[in-house]
Image (tube, grey):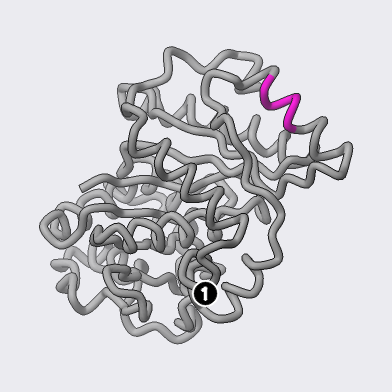
Amino acid sequence: MKVWTVSNQKGGVGKTTTAVSLGGLLAAQGERVLLVDLDPQGSLSVYFRCNPDNMEYSVYSLFQARANQRPPPPPDSLLQTTGIDGLSLLPASTSMATLDRQLGAQGGMGLVVREALVHLQTHFDYVLMDCPPMLGMLMVNALAACERLLIPVQTEFLALKGLERMLGTLQMIGRSRGDPLPYTIIPTFFDRRTRASTDALHALRDKHAEHLWARVIPIDTQFREASRGGLPINVYSPTARGTEAYASLLRWLQAAPVTAPAQISAGAAS
């Protein structure tokens, strides 16, 4: 089972879109895919018509069980259907926003998700986790559980600053894990008509070429329409530019070996 985390310490850069799009494409290949919503805002859950304000079982249930020293709920009770064959969802609850305050001092809380995924190894081929845009217990869990990190970065100046914060966090997590975590930077919301997009892309290529996917995810109104329909873009519009871009990214990820980065430079992580 391959476990990929989608994360950045800035909101609005395409994290949920990336998780849904890659998940939909993998399911279309016949893979068994689990999407895990680790963001208390629950965008991934809402995408598939789950209500984070009213979830009996969710990611939060895993942390509750650990805090109360109870066995975790059976996997089947946690999972929701998405309406897409081969694509399942472990939804979020807005209660997850309280985890750092409630349980931050308890030991072992950084490995809750990783231990839960062990029980799902025979159920799925891929796991894609959508993270909140801030460092905390949920992001630490996601980075501890995955073998590859995907960092969507909107091609504009403020998103580049978020990337620097994310790389600083990645360096810290690498020390905790005992080994660096392989990562890929994915330029998103690219609009070739604007200087802001082209300048941001050039900056990414200048500073992060070693870990940068060579192509871009373009602006495409079909992403918005697909989300309104609760469908991955490849299902909603198989010929859309966004579908082709994510299909290209997935081919690259499946072909590229998972190797740890040599070192995150001090400049990149500052």
Q: Is residue 113 left or right of residue 267?
A: left
Q: Quadrant of residue 200?
A: top right
Percent coordinates x, y for residue 8 in the rendering:
57, 44
- Residue found at the far right of this picture: 195
Q: Which amino acid does the dot numbered 1 rest on?
A: Tyr
* Camera-side residue of 204 and 221: 221
* Magenta-tinted stretch: 201-205
Query: What count of labels does the image hold?
Result: 1
* Quadrant into which the C terminus falls: top right
Compared with 173, 105 (above or below) is: below
Q: In this view, does 30 lie to the left or right of 228?
A: left
Percent coordinates x, y for residue 51 in the rendering:
48, 83
Residue 97 visible, this orientation: no
Percent coordinates x, y for residue 250 in the rendering:
42, 45
Residue at the (52%, 74%) spot, across then down: 47
Q: Is residue 243 left or right of residue 29?
A: right
